[in-house]
Amino acid sequence: MAETYTVPEGTRRARVDKLLAAAFREHSRTAWQRALDAGLVSVGGKAVGRDDTLQGGDVVSYAFPATQASTLKPVKIPLDVLFEDKHLLAINKPAGMVVHPGAATGEDTLVHALLAHCKGSLSGVGGIERPGIVHRLDRETSGLILVAKNDKAHRGLAEQFSGRTVQKEYLALVSGVPELLSGSLRKPIGRHPRHRHKMAAFEEGQGGRDAHTDWEVVESFGRIAALVRCTIHTGRTHQIRVHLKALGHVLLGDAIYGWKPDPRLSSQPARVMLHAEHLVVEHPVTHKPLDLRAAPPKDFAKLVKELRKAAKR
């Protein structure tokens, strides 16, 4: 059903999509462009396009195209939901789960699981019935990930992540123990020049994109390993793994970046020992602070106990 909007008198002439997106913060500019392309926005009974302009006093009639059903199949997979309302939810993702479906993935991704979990509550992100994921975790990384259920929440979260106002803390188990108790790494990160499946840390001005990680030792296990808390201020691919390697301490289980099995341990980690533990963000709709925590999974906690025992031998 079409609704109407009168552009306030005195408003300067501007493109239709830009002016309407500014007037209705709950709808993205892209959403307005979809409505315009579908011929659902008109002035004086005449449909307007995204390149047309509006000015003060214009009466706009508008509607939005129906949300398209996702082409992906919803799959019922148990999820550890830490927070949920009609706008977004926070998931404690298990290690081994891929976030987005791709050519080499099956129907066991987080997106497949979310389509089943949120059935009937997704109003569409980008015009399609799908969850809006604005940040990622690697397959082997466990922990907190935020998911938007609608365009407004998706846009609000995306703005916070791109604006670097989100507090993101990870727990990592690293080989060896840093000489200092804490520090800050500011090394640009980019694609490895020879091994394209890897990332690398560069010196300033020699390549890569800026990357900033603060770290502190939470617990040390003799000289074998350490539990390190990392706060990341940027979101580069493999950022913590690459920065801690540059510090001289590869994550346990991270064979890609040089970890090798340690004979001092009775069992070796089966994955990269990295967990997204803590996330502080402003709710994109209510604007209330969300302070979210995800306890480390069993394999992480089990290895910590094993390291404590190994340090006493």
Image (spheres, rainbow, N blue to C red):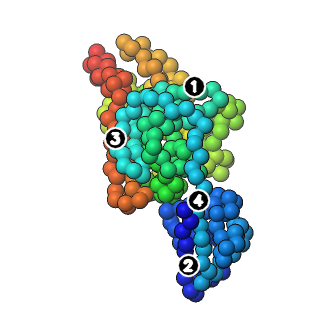
Determine which residue is flagged by label 4.
64
Q: Residue furthest bottom?
A: 10
Q: Residue at x 28, y 15 (%)?
A: 313
Mark with earlier residue (1, 3): 3
Classify mark 1: helix, strand or loop: loop
Find residue 284 and name its label: none
Q: Nearer the viewer, mark 1 or mark 4?
A: 4
Examine the rendering and report whether any part of residue 215 can be seen.
no
- The amino acid beneath tag 1 is Gly
Q: Residue at x 58, y 59 (%)?
A: 64
Classify mark 2: helix, strand or loop: strand
Residue 198 in which image quadrant: top right
Decide which of 305, 148 is in the foreground and name it. Answer: 148
Q: Nearer the viewer, mark 3 or mark 2?
A: 2
Q: Nearer the viewer, mark 4 or mark 3?
A: 4
- The amino acid beneath tag 4 is Phe
| Label 2, residues with CA under 10 Å away: few <14, some 14-19, many ≥20 | few
The x, y position of residue 58, in whole percent, is: 62, 80
Q: Residue at x 67, y 47 (%)?
A: 206
Q: Residue at x 61, y 49 (%)?
A: 209
- The amino acid beneath tag 2 is Thr
Determine which residue is flagged by label 1.
106
Q: Is residue 139 left or right of residue 265?
A: right
Task: Say which quadrant the N terminus sits in.
Answer: bottom right
Determine which residue is flagged by label 2.
6
Residue 303 in which image quadrant: top left
Mark with earlier residue (1, 4): 4
